[in-house]
Amino acid sequence: MRLVQRPSPSPLSYLYAAAGSLATSIAVVFAFTGDPEKSLQALSTVDPWLVARIFVIVGIIAAASLLSYRSGLWNIGQEGQAVVGALAAVASQNPAEALAAATAAAAAWALAPALLRAFAEVNEAVTTFLLSLAAVSVARYFVEGPLRDPGMRGFIATYEAPALSIAAAAAIFAAVLAGIAALYRTRLGLSLRLLASGEEVVKYAGRSPRVYILLALLLSGAVSGIGGAVEIMTREAGRYMTLQQVSTGFGLYGISAAWLGALHPIGSAAASLYIAWLYQVAINLKILGLPAQVANALVGTAMAWGLAGYVLHRYRVVWR
Amino acid sequence: MPQQAEPALRAVGITKFFPGVVALDGVDFEVNKGEVHSLLGENGAGKSTLISILYGVYAPDRGEIYLRGRRTTIHSPRHAAKLGISLISQHFALVDSLTVEENLRLAGIDVEKAEKIAEQLGVEIDMRRYVAELTVGQRQRLEIVKSLARESDVLLMDEPTALLSPREVKSLLAVVRRLAEMGKAVVFVTHKIREAVEVSDRITVLRRGKKIATYERPFDEDVLLAAMFETSVKRRVHKAGRAASEVIYRAEGLRGSRVREATIELRRGEVAAVLGVAGNGQEELMELLAGFKKPTGGRIFLDGQELTGRPFAEFLKKGVAYIPEDRWRALAKELSVLDNFKIRCVKNCVEALQEAKKELDIDFPSPSVRVAALSGGNQQKVILAREVWLRKPYVLIASHPTRGLDVETSEKFYALVRSAVSGGAVVSLEDVEEAVEKADRIYVMSRGRIAASFEPPFDIGEIAEAMTQ
């Protein structure tokens, strides 16, 4: 078996990938319940508020991911950047301040990997991933220390983040998508996209590759931070962090949605909606008494299908 | 049929077409056991194509191959290896991070046997050294030992001396002679007359896909030179001489990693050609001239203003355009034709692109199609359209700008350069005739230096000689 580069890419591959993921998910649900009726229940029960919230969060983080991948850079530290964003939100007094602080803090969190990549050619996938682990420790320090709410007696948790409505969160998501679409039409956006074809091409265009590497990674980090802030602020209750609950796992979901959505703003939004539904399915399974890890497994297979779609988009398989 | 030994390898009437070119036109070639038979010709003569066919990389469109007298179809390089044919090319199949011994084992070769062969061949191979530590010549000798250990009896050597230092060339030629003494059939591809004369039993000259003749010892270098460049050896007086104009661009004593010393002058309205055989540093020279790479020494002046070491963006601003040899330096693979056009185009780009499409006859279905989906020739046209037609540069530095273009488009390119480039152009070329026909001044590059420069009237014989030294 060999992979041969297609003369022109095949967009159909993403449809196949989505169909493959859907089939896998249905098969997994059937395998776990072993009962058509229960399966149908698990697949069809939908809480619109929950799906809407997850959709917006995953969508924003997917947007953050594509900002990096469309420039050929591998930011996989969305989780950590989101945690830092959520921390900044917790430390803020009102939603506007929270969003601004989250953007700045998460961009700052992405600065070290960006500088290392731009000036020392250190692989950004490694540094962003490791900083995700670091973010959890940093968050725990803040939970126990500077941001601990003394009002919660005997319970170690932070202050509460300001509340944000789902409608406002959706508006922020729409603004992020529109911003990316507009950015990619400008000369600045063109240079960011040139980067995916190699630093030499950016240099050939008369620009400094370093500037665009920094910009792409900082933008990606900043938007992840917004995702993290939106996540904590849109909770119905418990808009605080505890020692056990720092990381939420939406970083992985966002990355999956970006790939499954062909690294396109609209595509990744559609994929985010699909992933939100998978999240709902996992909760339904949990209610039916099945293991909670199934949620991650389903999203994981969705990401695998998304990557397969990306590969088949550019290569065709030759069985010989 | 008379009872004489069949040639180890014989090719009859080999013809190969590539889109728009006849790469080989009914070429006959044979090599005997115990013989070194050289293929001599300038770039584009068809030497590499013939070698690729003998090694099973391409299938010939017409013609037959006989191996030890039996008609054979060579399906693939792997098949060629099985048939006892091996290729020593400039790209070695060695892993840098492993030792010589590990590399041999990796290739499934008995190390003791390899040691014995190395001894027979009179080459020294240190089994414990890492391949990364070996010189190019040592790697090449290791490849030769590998192919002998695999019981190959036909060795194809494609420009084996191109990357070697003069001393290593000497020892390689000795090894090649010893291979023949060991009864191997060696095909030695070169563009250097001296080497061919020194090492060969027979020499076949190819020119533009045709076999000119096969010569036997004793060789006459003048005859070989004439055969390589035949039609053009007659002195050719250049078109109307241009009135000497002022120097607008001057590079003095440029140095880089391969370029050792290059001084180039460009006068207003002039097209200067840099000629040389591949691998002599022309590509780096072009990078240095265009400001794409910073020189380690020397100075660059444009209109009397020093630009040495300034960023590429400043060269662009001063009206310098650069067309690199590798298209993927100038085109973003992942993006559409339009996005690629926008690398230089600022407004009304869709209209401009459509106009360029008509003007240069570029074939693409829509501006939004990915540039990687176009044919090589059309990609080159997109670059020419953007860098020359659209930008109308003051100084154009172009590396092999007409490679992959048909004759008509290449004519169009030169016409475009004359009309759209306001200052002058430096183009690196590999075809002497193209240079003589199109350029106002010719620099010949050899081993990282500008070895000679010529002004009209050009004498092709002299130029060719400077190139093949």
Image (cartoon, grey):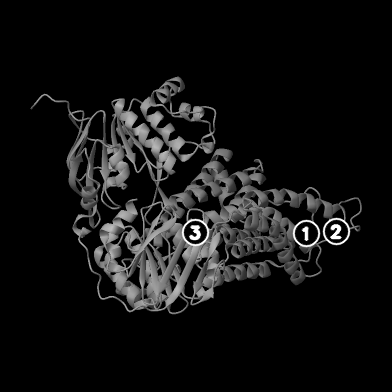
Q: Nearer the viewer, residue B399 or A24?
A: B399
Q: CA distance from mark 2 to mark 3?
A: 44 Å
Identified by mark 2, the residue type is Leu
> What kind of element bears circle 2?
loop
Identified by mark 1, the residue type is Leu
Q: What is the chain identity of the residue bearing mark 3? A: A
The tag earlier along the polypeptide, 2 or 1, is 1
User: Dot 2 corresponds to which residue?
Assistant: A147
Q: Nearer the viewer, mark 2 or mark 3?
A: 3
Tell me, yes or no, whether the two marked residues, 2 and 1, touch with CB atoms within 8 Å.
yes
- Quadrant of the drawing holding the N terminus of chain B: top left
Q: Is residue A59 left or right of residue B238?
A: right
Q: Nearer the viewer, residue A73 or B11?
A: B11
Q: What is the chain identity of the residue bearing mark 2? A: A
The tag earlier along the polypeptide, 3 or 1, is 1
Q: Residue at x 50, y 30 (%)?
A: B100
> What kind of element bears circle 1?
helix
For residue B117, which quarter of the picture?
top left
> What kind of element bears circle 3?
helix
The tag earlier along the polypeptide, 2 or 3, is 2
- Determine if residue A236 is in view: no
Q: Is residue A257 above or below residue A98?
A: above
Q: Residue at x 81, y 61 (%)?
A: A160
Q: Are labels 2 and 3 on one chain?
A: yes
Q: Is residue B443 above or below residue B110?
A: below
User: Dot 3 corresponds to which residue?
Assistant: A197
Q: What is the chain identity of the residue bearing mark 1? A: A
User: Dot 1 corresponds to which residue?
Assistant: A87
Q: Is residue B249 left or right of residue B213?
A: right
- Determine if residue A69 is in view: yes
Q: Are labels 2 and 1 on one chain?
A: yes
Q: Residue at x 28, y 41 (%)?
A: B197
